[in-house]
Amino acid sequence: MSNSLEMVKIAKAALADKKAEDIKVIDIQGVSVLADYFIIANGSNPNQVQAMVDNVEEELGKAGYECRQIEGYGSAGWILMDYGDIIVHAFSKEDRLFYDLERIWRDGKLVEEGEL
């Protein structure tokens, strides 16, 4: 298993552990050099969104992966976590609808549950 897929599995489980909603994984390897995967999820309030991010950081840290940069933590409307090979986007419901990353990155391949 590649490091990026291992990171995706850990991050997705960490998000699910904090009851993240509508977790999507998009394979962007064929359309961008930014990363291999985007993980997109949302929470129902700022505290939950921050807890989701905290848990991702903790679980990936335990596995030896360090976050390069976190943006937007204070407002918790859209928190971006850059791990190099994967980028985690944790949104409020409203901001997720507004920015609609799934539409913007529709050229990427949506990764189904069984493919991980």
Image (tube, rainbow, N blue to C red):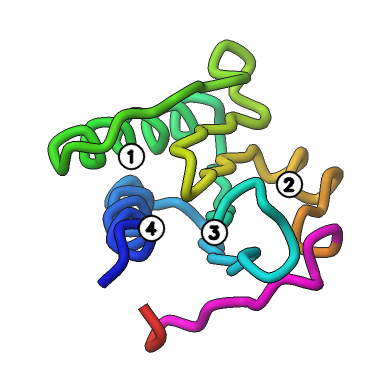
Residue, disc 1: 56
Q: Position of residue 14 (x, y in %)?
A: 29, 49
Rendering quarter of residue 56? top left
Residue at image position (42%, 81%) is 113
Image quadrant for the N terminus? bottom left
Gap in Å between the C-alphas at discs 2 and 1?
A: 18 Å
The reply to whether callout 4 and callout 1 are in contact (CB within 8 Å) is no
- Is residue 66 rendered magenta in the image? no
Structural distance between the alpha carbons of marks 4 and 1: 14 Å
Q: Amino acid at mark 2?
A: Arg
In the rendered image, which residue does mark 2 sit on? 96
Which secondary structure, mark 3? strand
- Indicate which disc residue 37 carries: 3
Magenta-colored span: 104-113
Q: Residue 20 at what x, y percent from top left?
A: 45, 51
Q: Toward the viewer: 10 or 47?
A: 10
Task: Tell which circle, 2 or 3, labels the residue nearer the N-terminal end.
Answer: 3
Mark 4: which amino acid?
A: Ser
Q: Looking at the image, is mark 3 or mark 4 earlier in the sequence? A: 4
Looking at the image, which residue sits at the far left? 62
Q: Nearer the viewer, residue 103 or 107?
A: 107
Q: Pointers 3 and 1 in contact (CB under 8 A)?
A: no
Furthest-bottom residue in this view? 114
Element class at badge 2: helix
Real-space Cα separation, disc 2 to disc 3, in angstroms: 17 Å
Picture quadrant where residue 64 is located: top left
Q: Nearer the viewer, mark 4 or mark 1?
A: 4
